Image (spheres, coloured by chain):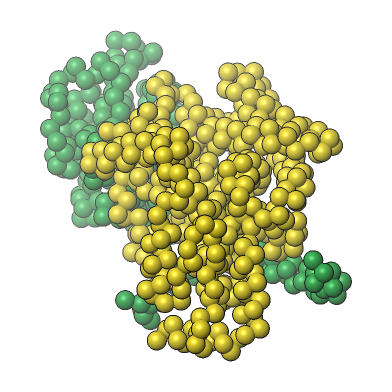
Chain colours: A green, B yellow
Amino acid sequence: MGINRRNFLKVAGAAGGILLAGGARSAWTAQTPEGGVEFYGILIDTTKCIGCRACEEACNAQNSLPAPKVSFSSESVFEKRRDTTPEAYVVVNRLPNEKSPEKPIFVRKQCMHCTEPSCASACLCKAMEKMPEGPTVYHKDRCMGCRYCMVSCPFDIPKFEYDKASPFVKKCVGCPDRVAKGEQTACAEACPEGATLFGKRRDLIEEAKKRIYQNPDRYYPHIYGEHEVGGTGYMYLSAVPFEKVDFRTDLGTKHYPELTSGFLSSVPLVDILWPAVLFGFNYLISDKEEEGGKENHHGE
Amino acid sequence: MESNVTPMPIPGRPAAPDTGTLKGFLQFLWKELKPRGKVLTPFNIITGIIILGGIVIIGIRLAKGLGAVTNLSQAYPWGIWIGFDVVTGVAFAGGAYILTFAVHILKVKKYEPIVRATVLNGFLAYVFYSGALLLDLGRPWNVVNPIIGNAFGYGSVLFLVAWHFLLYTLCLFVEVSPAIAEWLKWVKARRIIEKMTTATIILGVTLSTLHQAGLGALFLTAPSKIHPLWYSSNIPVLFFISSMFAGFSLIIIESMFTHRIFSDRLDDAHRASHNKILLGLAKGSASVMAAYLFLKVIDLTHGHQLGLLFTPMGLWYLVEVAGFTLLPLVLYVVAIRRQSVRLVQITAFLTAFGVVLNRMNISVIAFKWYEAVRYYPSWMEIWVTLAVISMELWVFQWVINRMPILGAHPDFKMEENTLNNLNGAEVVRWKVSAS
């Protein structure tokens, strides 16, 4: 087998692709609200959550995850702070409430489905991808297991199967099949208290603002996820400041892909200008040598 | 007709077969693959044990997953296999691009004697570190995905790094290949490669620039996880600059060992100019380090992070920047003024340690410094790292003992001159060997 035309074109195309890589605007940029298509998302009202873990159970069934060690109806899991795992894409934690200590706060944790996800921009083989409807999905057949998505995710959501010889990255993928059909996510459907509300992101922000305006005593006046890391699809309301219920409030409002876009846009520039400059140097110096250094060269 | 390839006489060995024919080539290869000299040296025994153990651990890793041998966790997805083997190792391979740039583009002939060893070092480093990278990938069989194009992640820094890594490794191979051609006495191939040299080196320098910087740019996506003293939007530039003095220091260190161990392979030109070369490298290193420190100070003051210096992490930062970058810079300057090669060599070790500290800090130590349960490497991670280094040293040793790396073999030079004058005869020979 040698190089045939098709292979050559593939390679040539690939090489051209690198040159273009920095300049091209990422695919998901086109699908931000400004671009027209509107994302679906979820509004999580922690003041309404009663910690029943129906969302966890529904998520487990929806994604055919293994049965948990402790049953979904047991409250013993609240004794320790939990994180999502490769077997549990959403977890509810119980946190103390400073405002009214007799009423603990329940906060669920899952993928935030960022408007411009860091994981998707980090992935070199598009295993993480933002769908036009909003969910950030995972294509397991593409993934090479480099775990750069885990390094890049500001919320530490992607989880890796360290104990498997053929491991995958696991996280909440936002029920893409349901959302594409116009149905709500499994967790939103299961929530008995309306603490998890599914809808268009813009409508959810309106709803959240309305709740804050109408019940100023009940809510801390901030929608977590409206602006954090450039906006997320899954957003939160809380009775207390968000840093009190384990949210990172130091993440800024910049889209995460912007952090590397400056560097990436310098790539074609360097790849084209650098060789030109170096060839120039090389010619300049060779000319100089021919004039003055030739005899010297032979004398060595 | 008579073959023009006169086998390179190796002292105390019978003449080598004609490598112009397939049969002769295979015979030659078989002969060269056999170990030469004493096999059971202490170095070989120790590294041999490390490599064997490493292979066992790699077997466990492939059978049972990364969790069975590493201390990686959901909070620390990258450990020393990335932080040391790849991120640090590649910085030290930087000597190859900076030296080929100086010698072939700027035509600074002074450094010519050390180019080949440095390029060989760079090439082996890339080959073995990309090997180590495969071990760290959860699904290494998918490593071709971003290359064959079934899913191009254009927007990813890692995509850029992967491509530049691959292409630069190919460039390094071309840069090493003159030595291989001389070893095989493939004069014509040698001449074709020679014509590619300038273009390859220019491509190599370009790829290295972005590739070294890109390794730093990887960490730009973790502003909330890397300690503010280390996180900076200048990380790519800092990585690029520090890869230069990492490269310089490794050349100095490597030449200390090669001069002691392979002294019989050195040619006279190499020996005579060596002190001058080392002092020159020290000068280069010192000026680059000054630029690096300047950028570091700008980062520190512009980020208003001076207050952080008096925290435990701040002191650790000072150990790295003052203890292992500023101090070596001062020592290099002293060494240059006193023309002390000894001090240059000692300083190279300090500098190299500073670069290791910097890369490890960004990728492992200052990464999520706030976590309650910290990552530290398991003994098996360290063992595999040592095994990778040992394998690289074995190949390095094998190549140095066979190919003209530390000095062009005088016989080859003579032979090439003869052949240049007998162009017609050579063409006939190639036709003969091809049929």
Q: Position of residue A132 (x, y in %)?
A: 34, 56
The quarter of the picture where residue B80 lies is top left
The answer to whether A98 is drawn above or below residue A59 in the figure is above
Place of residue B146 in the rendered image (x, y in percent of width and height, measured from the top left): 39, 59
- Name of the residue lying farthest toward the top: A102
Along the line of sight, the residue nearer the viewer: A82 or A213 = A82
Q: For residue A170, which quarter of the picture?
A: top left
The residue nearer to you, when weighing B148 against B415, is B415
B152 to the left or right of B235 = left
Tell me if A173 is positioned left or right of B47 in this view: left
Determine whether B405 is above or below B415 in the image.
Answer: above
Identified at 35% across, 45% down, the residue is: B135
Q: Position of residue B130 (x, y in %)?
A: 43, 50
Locate residue B82 relative to residue A176 in the image: left or right.
right
How many numbered circles are shown?
Answer: 0
Observer-nearest of A92 and B121? B121
Outermost residue toward the right? A292
Q: Which residue corresponds to the image point at 51% horizontal and 81% vertical from the top-left?
A: B3
Residue B301 visible here:
no
Q: Quadrant of the C terminus of chain B?
A: bottom left
Q: Residue at x 61, y 36 (%)?
A: B352
The residue located at (30%, 28%) in the rendering is A83
Q: For this rendering, which residue is in front, B203 or A209?
A: B203
Residue B110 visible in image: yes
Point out residue A164 in the picture as x, y percentages from the top left corner. Answer: 23, 40
